[in-house]
Amino acid sequence: MEHAVRFHQTGGPEVLRWEDVDVGSPGPGEALVQHVAVGLNFADAYFRSGLYPVQLPSGIGVEAAGVVKAVGEGVTNVAPGDRVTYTGFLDTLGAYCTERILRAAPLIRLPDGISYETAAAMTMRGLTSAYLMRRIWPLKAGDSILLHAAAGGVGLIVSQWAKLL
């Protein structure tokens, strides 16, 4: 039996429960991922408290890293044994668990040089940084940037990446 942290009512940390869950098998377009590390985000407290409303009961957590255990029909971007990471928001809520089934499309294969712990802690911040620096404004050598909070995850990655450029 697998396990997940879930809550059946909103409130403080005391509403969180460690529960047995039946994960099942992945369907078409899905993958079964065994978690090795889970990212902790301040938004998790917002879901738990009810500030960000979700249908109850609910899982908690939006990003993690682990190993693909099985894939459903039509999945070509990942295969059993692949190291992966993912992040999202409502579509991935429930990351605080040992195993889960997810849509396979947003899974990112994890290079060997990046640990599960690093990936789980920075996938959301890294993708946000890449979006800002590559899609919003293709940052290049000589450009100036202003970071209002370089001490956070995104600010740290953006400042290091910008310096590298």
Image: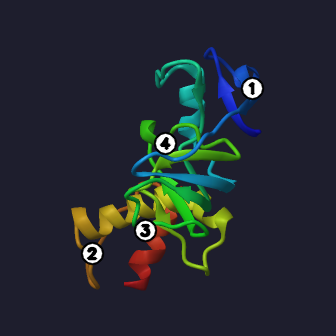
The correct choice, above or below, for 151 with respect to 77 in the image is above
Q: CA distance from mark 1 to mark 4?
A: 18 Å
Q: Earlier in the sequence, mark 1 or mark 2?
A: 1
> Which residue is identified by label 3?
158
Q: CA distance from mark 2 to mark 3?
A: 10 Å
Question: Foreground residue, 3 or 55?
Answer: 3
> Which residue is identified by label 2?
139
Q: Amino acid at mark 4?
A: Thr
Q: Earlier in the sequence, mark 1 or mark 4?
A: 1
Q: Who's the residue at 31% across and 68% down the image?
A: 133
Question: For the C terminus, which image quadrant?
Answer: bottom left
Task: From the top left corner, tell me how far across and down residue 107 is, in percent.
Answer: 46, 59
Task: From the top left corner, tell me how far across and down residue 153 is, in percent.
Answer: 53, 58
Q: Are marks 4 and 2 in contact (CB under 8 Å)?
A: no
Q: CA distance from mark 3 to mark 1?
A: 36 Å
> Which residue is identified by label 4?
92
SS state under label 3: helix
Q: Is residue 117 left or right of residue 87?
A: right
SS state under label 4: helix
Q: Earlier in the sequence, mark 3 or mark 1?
A: 1
Q: Amino acid at mark 1?
A: Arg
Is residue 154 shown to the viewer in this render? no
> Which residue is identified by label 1?
17
Q: Are marks 1 and 2 in contact (CB under 8 Å)?
A: no
Q: Amino acid at mark 2?
A: Leu
What is the residue that sits farthest to the top in this orientation?
A: 9
